[in-house]
Amino acid sequence: MSQLALNAVVSGILLGGFYACMALGISIAFGMLDVTNIAHPAFAVLAAFIAFKLNTMGVDVLLGCLLMLPLFYIAGRGTFRFYHAAFERHGEDAMRGLAFFFGLMFVIEIGLALTFGVDLRALRTDYTQGVFRFHDVIFPRRTLVCFAVSAVVFILLQLLLTKSFVGRAILAGAQNPHALRFMGINPTRIREIAFGISVAAAAVAGVLLLLVQPVEPFSGREYIGRVFAVCVLGGLGSIPGTFLAAIILGVCESVVSTFFGPSWSPAAAFGILLATLAFKPSGLFGK
């Protein structure tokens, strides 16, 4: 493998770590709860702006992320509670529920535009500047940090889902929510907790987005297609599948962008998605 191709693959793997974190909340909401939260990237952009504001007050962006997690978790639970009461409980959680999240996305975007303006916000930190070199391989520090944070988040979430009672209840509810009632568990409450976790994951994704690129109120729209593609490609509700699919998508975009130009990278990435759906509709880790 040539040096150029090797660096393209490495850059794609690191970029895939960022995509994985962006798609994690969708994997929970859409894959496990069957809730099409189209506003998920908007939540991430909201977190990016809050992190930027905290940084101007002297709070490190990663510390700011930890401070935002409980707030976004509570906001996610509140959002799901309203969604369930207004739509899901009445069996209107398809098109009307989707319209609700579209509206929520617009409210967040317009609110950010009115509060912060439409100018780009960029953030520089000492630990994301420059590159790290290993022989002839270049590791951009900003995407290296994002990959490391994303990997830690995925490991912690996987442990939560497989080792804790609440996590196992979420996984069980994703397969058969009615069975939870026979165990004395309120499935709506479990779904509410899971949706809160998905929105908290959006907070982490927003902080990483701020480290990767400048943001403006409508930055999340460019990731809507990617995050759903990653979720479907990895297998609905599969946390390891989401991470692997994001790596595949990142490598594909990076290699195609390097050798054929950036304009071809989205087409190639979604071409892989279409091929996967054609030969394995359940995704890489789907059942």
Image (spheres, rainbow, N blue to C red):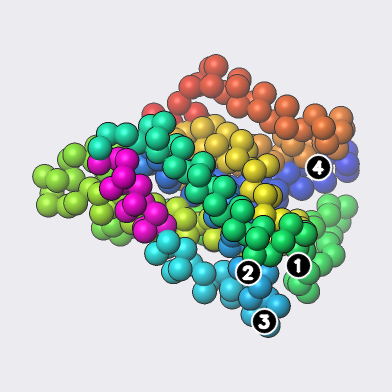
Q: Earlier in the sequence, mark 4 or mark 3?
A: 4
Where is residue 66? Give x, y as percent. 53, 72
In this rendering, which labeled residue sits more in front, label 4 or label 1? 1
Where is residue 12? Give x, y as percent. 73, 44
Crowding at label 1, few (<14), some or many (≥20) Cα neighbours within 10 Å? some
Q: Magenta region's main secondary structure?
A: helix
Where is residue 11? Give x, y as percent. 77, 48
**Residue type (three-letter) at the residue carrying disc 2:** Ala
Q: CB under 8 Å between callouts 2 and 1?
A: yes
Alpha carbon separation for disc pair 4 and 1? 25 Å
Crowding at label 2, few (<14), some or many (≥20) Cα neighbours within 10 Å? many
- Image position of 136 with respect to 91: above or below: below
Q: Earlier in the sequence, mark 1 or mark 3?
A: 3
Considering depth in this image, is 109 or 55 the residue closer to the camera?
109
Q: Residue at x 47, y 55 (%)?
A: 199
Q: Secondary structure at mark 2?
A: helix
- Residue 88: say if magenta: yes
- Magenta span of residues: 76-89
In the rendered image, the quadrant that contains the N terminus is top right
Q: Residue furthest top?
A: 278
In this rendering, which labeled residue sits more in front, label 4 or label 3? 3
**Residue type (three-letter) at the residue carrying disc 3:** Met
Residue bearing mark 4: 8
**Residue type (three-letter) at the residue carrying disc 4:** Ala
Residue bearing mark 2: 51
> Which labelled disc corresponds to residue 57?
3
Q: Secondary structure at mark 4?
A: helix
Q: CB under 8 Å between callouts 1 and 3?
A: no
Residue bearing mark 1: 123
Determine if residue 134 is in view.
no
